[in-house]
Amino acid sequence: MQFRNTILVAATTISLATAGQINFYSDRNCQNYIGEAHPGIGQITGGPAGGFSALWVNGDLWSCTQSCGPYWICGDSGCGNKVSVATGKCVSFSTGVWGVNRCQFC
């Protein structure tokens, strides 16, 4: 029983640490999948080399219950060039793609 509880606690901790899933694609219209990431809230995460489009598959806002978002897909590692998106919306940049869930409180 204690082992099962340990697994449950570990799984819960992992789910709280991620802000969702972002998929990366080698084309500009989110068709040729090349990888995914599960970044922590506020953590800017780049796609694999050769990635030019991305979309948020889902987002974990449970740990951020008053969140107004946003989910960003960015064209640079500092997210200076960004598009705020809903899950499922494909965004492309010719410079590569990065993603971040800013999880800001209203």
Image (cartoon, rainbow, N blue to C red):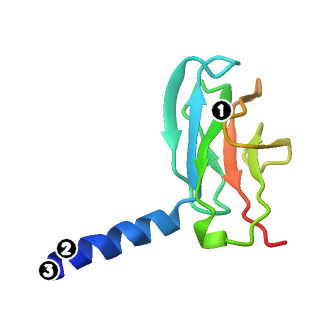
Is label 2 in a helix, a strand or a loop? helix
| Residue 103 screen position, x and y as percent | 72, 64
Observer-nearest residue: 84 or 88? 88
Q: Which residue is mark 2?
A: 4
Q: Residues within 10 Å of mark 3 (few under 14, many from 20)?
A: few
Q: Residue at x 79, y 48 (%)?
A: 79
Amino acid carrying label 2: it is Arg
Observer-nearest residue: 57 or 36? 57
Is label 1 in a helix, a strand or a loop? strand
Distance of label 2 from label 1 (alpha carbons): 36 Å
The reply to whether the C-beta atoms of the residues labelled 3 and 2 are less than 8 Å apart is yes
Q: Residues within 10 Å of mark 2 (few under 14, many from 20)?
A: few
Q: Residue at x 64, y 59 (%)?
A: 43
Q: With 87 as the anchor, is 68 left or right in this view?
A: right
| Residue 104 screen position, x and y as percent | 78, 68
Amino acid carrying label 3: it is Met
| Residue 96 screen position, x and y as percent | 69, 31
Q: Which mark is residue 1?
A: 3
Is label 3 in a helix, a strand or a loop? loop
Q: Which mark is residue 25?
A: none
Where's the C terminus, which quadrant?
Answer: bottom right
| Residue 74 screen position, x and y as percent | 76, 41
